[in-house]
Amino acid sequence: MPYLGELAAITAALCWTLNSLAVERLGKGLSSWGLNTLTKLGGLITVSLLALVMHGRLIPQATPRQWVMLLFSGLIGFSIGDGFLFTAFQQIGAKRTLLIFSANPIIAAILGWAVMGEALTLQHIFAILLAVTGIMIVIQGDVPGQQKRLQWQGILWAVLATLGQAGGVILSKMSLESLDAIPAAQIRLVGGVIGMGIILSILKKWGHVPPILKDKKGRQTITVSILLGTLIGMVLSMLSIKLIPVAIASILFSLMPVMILPISAFVFKERVNAREVLGAFITVGGVSMLFL
C-alpha cells in the first residue's frame, strides 16, 4: 500500500493528540509518574493480547540483538525521555516544552544519517524544515511573552527529553528489519515498564500509583491512554518507523500541536488565533511535500 508508513505515523499522531486532550481533562491532580507507569503496564498487557490473536503467541520471537535494542529503546524513550518530558511540562509549561521538543525530527534526521546512513532528498529536508517551522509558529502563538521567566533547568529537561525520544526511535529502527510492529511494540513496552519500575523505586513514588486506581477519573484516564496512546498509537508508530526514514516518521509524530487546533476550535469551541492558523498551513504544506 503506497504511503502506508506515512499514514500510520499520521494516525498515531492523531491518537496521541486525542489521548493528550483526554489526559489533560481527566488526569488533573494525578501523578504523571503513576499514570505513565500504569499506562505502559496496561499497554504491555493489551498489546500482548493483540499479539496472541494476530500471531498466536504471547512471547515475541526476536533475536537477542533485537531484544536488547528494543528494551533500551523503551527504557530511553518511555522511561527516561517521558520522565524528563513530564518534568519539563511542570517547570516551564507544555507549550515551551513542545517548542523545544519540535526539534526532534531534525535530531532524528541527523542521527538517522550518522548511525544508519539514511539519506534524505533535498525535497524531504526542505519539507521537514518547513513543517518544523510551522509547528514552532503554532506553539509560539500560545506562549505568553514575558509572563514567566524561563527556567534553565526546565529547558535542560526538555532538551534531554528530545534526545531521549530521538534516541528511542533510532534504536527501534535498527531492530525492525525482520520484526513485525506488534512484537516490536511488546518488547519496547517491556523496557518501558522496567524503566518506570526503576524510576519509581529510586524516587520512592510507588505510593502515587494506588490513588489513581481508586479514582474514577484515574481509571478513565488510564483506559483511554492504554487504548489510544499505546495499543493503537504505539503499534502504528512502530509500523511507520519500520517502513519510512526516522526523520519523516518523527516529523509526522510531531503534528500533535497542529492537530489540536481544529479539535479545540470545532469540538471545544476554543479561540484559535491567526498565528496558529498560519503555522498550521505552513506545517500542512511541509507535510504535503513528503507525499509528492
Image (cartoon, grey):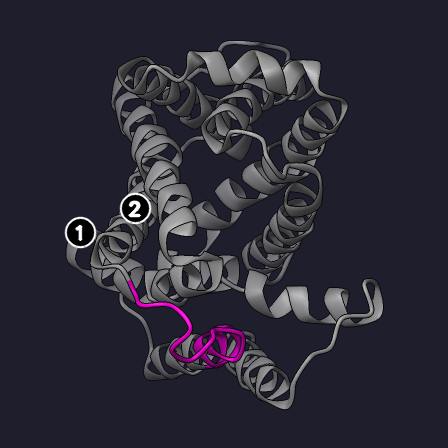
Which dot marks residue 170? 2
Tell me the residue at 53%/43% (across/down).
Answer: 239
Q: Position of residue 219 (x, y in %)?
A: 71, 23
Circles 2 and 1: CB atoms closer than 8 Å: yes
At label 2, which amino acid type do we have? Ile
Query: Which stretch did the figure color magenta?
Result: 134-150
Q: Is residue 143 magenta?
A: yes
Q: Say whether residue 103 is visible.
A: yes
Q: Is residue 19 magenta?
A: no
Amino acid of disc 1 = Val
Quadrant of the image occupied by residue 175? top left
Q: Which mark is residue 115?
A: 1
Q: Earlier in the sequence, mark 2 or mark 1?
A: 1
Label 1 secondary element: helix
Q: Tell me which residue sits at (64%, 46%) in the image.
A: 24
Determine the secondary structure under disc 2.
Answer: helix
Q: Is residue 118 visible?
A: no
